[in-house]
Image (cartoon, rainbow, N blue to C red):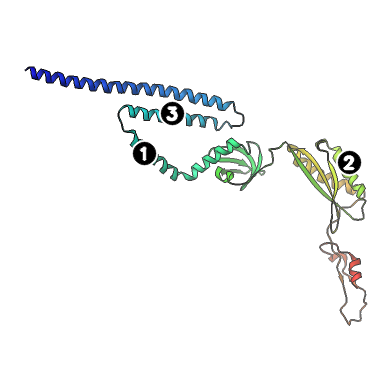
Amino acid sequence: MEETQNAVLETWDLIWLQIVEYGTGILEALIILIVGFWIAGRVSNWVKRAISKQDHIDDTLKPFFASIVRYTILIIVLVAILNRLGVQTASIIAVIGAAGLAIGLALQGTLQNIAAGIMLIILRPFKVGDFVDAGPVSATVDEIGLFTTKFTTVDGVYISCPNSSLWNSKITNYSRNGTRRMDIVIGISYDDDIGQAMSILSDIMAKDDRILKDPAPEVMVMNHGESSVDINMRLWANGGDFWPLKWDLMRATKEQIEADGLSIPYPQRDVHVNPTSGSSSDSAPKAIPASVSVGKKASAKKAAAKK
């Protein structure tokens, strides 16, 4: 009888030890879980506040970074809880790693877009409202997302472009700098007065307040063409005024040049036909009527010199 009682007591002691041991492990796991959630929330909020102070990071990425930090901490907490409960975490970590690798391979294109979206948001080669020429797109940026970037073309067409296509192409941002240089070439006849033409163009630029004074606008002879003397108007303007100013100057220069008696020539070619050898016709070259003149102007003196 006494031996039976001792056996019962020993069994109870073993059960109690197991209860205490597992109970302590469960209690510690609960404490780790509570503390882990608290730390994850506090660190996530701290990261969000720290990123919010950085003006060069887009608002789209701020909650994304905070979520990454929070879930990373929670994964570590989960592994710690399983380890405290006696679960072999090495195999679980291996399974998680294999699953992550499989998911990464399956979503390779999507992950490339996410990575490209993060880089576009961090480095900011363009922002919302900029007019850019990037890869297959030449339009105004409407929204920068983690997967795609949305655009609107000048004729009102909506475009959604994968971020990876933008990141792997050259990006030209026409709105990044506040000012832009403009060059307008005006051709005048060789018979016209170059000084008068340059003075006319300078006066046109001086009257328009949209043209910046610094850098100062310039007028220079750019080229002696086959049918015209090319004079260039070089000026700087604010990005928002660029196209309206260019359209106005293109009209004003033509109207003023012609009003002051100068001409803007168009390319033409005078063709002279030589008679065939042995012909009784007049040996002087015959000019084709002006109605059939085509192409670029050639000097009649050169044609006569060959004869």
**Disc 1 marks which amino acid?**
Ala
Task: Using the rendered view, name the quadrant where residue 30 is placed.
Answer: top left
Residue carrying label 1: 94
Q: Nearer the viewer, residue 87 or 138?
A: 87
The residue nearer to you, when weighing 245 against 118, is 118
Q: Residue at x 24, y 21 (%)?
A: 19
* x and y, in percent, of residue 218 in the image: 84, 43
Measuring from the top left, give residue 210's x and y in whole percent: 80, 36
Question: Which residue corresponds to the image point at 30% horizontal and 23% vertical from the top-left?
Answer: 25
Residue 55: name its quadrant. top right
Disc 1 or disc 2, which is closer to the eye? 1
Q: Which residue is mark 2?
A: 203
- Asked if residue 147 shows in the view, the reply is no
Mark earlier in primary sequence (2, 3):
3
- Disc 3 target residue: 73
Is residue 21 depicted above or below 127 in this figure? above
Q: Residue at x 49, y 42 (%)?
A: 111
Residue 21: percent from left, percent from top: 26, 22
Structural distance between the alpha carbons of marks 2 and 3: 69 Å
